[in-house]
Amino acid sequence: MLVIFLALANVQKIVMRIGAKGADAAMRIVGFFVAIMGMGLIFHGVNEFLQSYHIVSP
């Protein structure tokens, strides 16, 4: 939480340092990781669901 607070408090300095293209690249990378985590949660949930009805073996 502290790291996020410091990043948000100094966002102006960070954007000035990495530039607009760097900020865009960082947002795309973070978005990609969030999408991967979401897909992992979906696959885990589907797997648990299928195991609970004995459709697939554990």
Image (cartoon, helix red, strand yellow):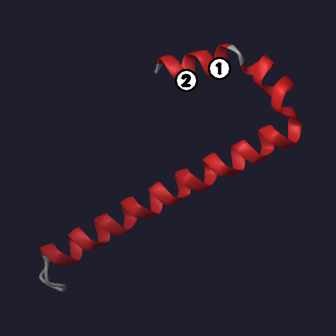
Q: Mark 1 = which residue?
A: 8
Which residue is nearer to you in this view: 38 or 30? 30
Classify mark 2: residues with Cα within 10 Å, few (<14), some (14-19) or many (20+).
Answer: few
Q: Position of residue 14 (x, y in %)?
A: 76, 24
Circle 2/circle 1 CB separation < 8 Å: yes
Classify mark 1: residues with Cα within 10 Å, few (<14), some (14-19) or many (20+).
Answer: few
Q: Quadrant of residue 23?
A: top right
- Callout 2 amino acid: Ile
40 lies left or right of 13: left
Above or below for 46 versus 55: above
Q: Position of residue 38 (x, y in %)?
A: 46, 57
Residue in view at x 81 percent, y 40 percent: 22
Above or below for 3 versus 47: above
Q: Quadrant of residue 41?
A: bottom left
**Number of marks:** 2
Q: Quadrant of residue 24?
A: top right
Q: Quick one: SS at disc 1?
A: helix
- Callout 1 amino acid: Leu
Residue in view at x 30 percent, y 71 percent: 46
Residue in view at x 26 percent, y 73 percent: 47
30 lies left or right of 14: left
Above or below for 48 versus 38: below
Residue in view at x 39 percent, y 64 percent: 42
Mark sitting on residue 55 = none
Q: Mark 2 = which residue?
A: 4
2 lies left or right of 21: left
Q: Position of residue 37 (x, y in %)?
A: 46, 55
Q: Quick one: SS at disc 2?
A: helix
